[in-house]
Image: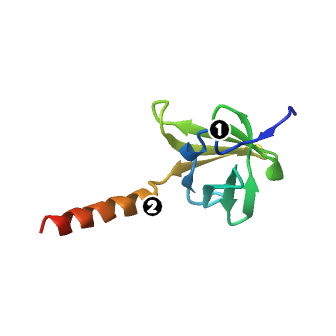
Amino acid sequence: MGAFMTVNAQSSPLNDYLGKYVFAEGSPVAEVSLTIEDSSLVINSAMGSTPLEKKGVDSFYLATYDALVVFKRKDGTSVESISIFVQGMELMGKKEASPVALKEDEFYATLWAKQNH
């Protein structure tokens, strides 16, 4: 295996990957969330939290499980899904809408309604 580097949040677009990803029913993993901790991209699941090591464009290495993690983008822009290649399987998860953005939208809708009534 080649050398890996820890991803620094200040110098890369890690925010593209943040959020919750839901896997198909019956998958070994129901869902994962991606967060930033200590300037590293971290994958969180019921099995624990592990930092990801950047391997290439939209690809990372999950050392704990010797797995390749690849993010797929919609029309080359926003991240829409994650694939985890582990033990000869591909686990695919779809990114959910950000609850923070939804709450922010609700906040502005409420604020707008109060100001206009």
Res 90 seen here: yes
Q: Can you tell which quarter of the image residue 13 is in?
A: top right
Which quadrant holds the N terminus?
A: top right
Measuring 25% from the left and 67% from the top, which residue is drawn there?
Answer: 110
Amino acid type at circle 1 is: Ser
Measuring 82% from the left and 53% from the top, which residue is drawn there?
Answer: 64
Q: Can you tell which quarter of the image residue 104 is in?
A: bottom left
The disc label shown at residue 112, or none: none
* Residue under numbered circle 2: 99
Q: Callout 1 environment at 10 Å: few (<14), some (14 to 19), or many (20+)?
A: few
| Nearest-to-viewer mark from 2 and 1 | 1
Q: In this orientation, which residue lies closer to the viewer: 58 or 81?
A: 58
Which quadrant holds the C terminus?
A: bottom left
Residue placed farthest to the left in the image?
Answer: 117
* Residue under numbered circle 1: 11
Is the C-beta separation of discs 2 and 1 under 8 Å? no
Q: In this orientation, which residue lies closer to the viewer: 110 or 43?
A: 110
Amino acid type at circle 2 is: Pro
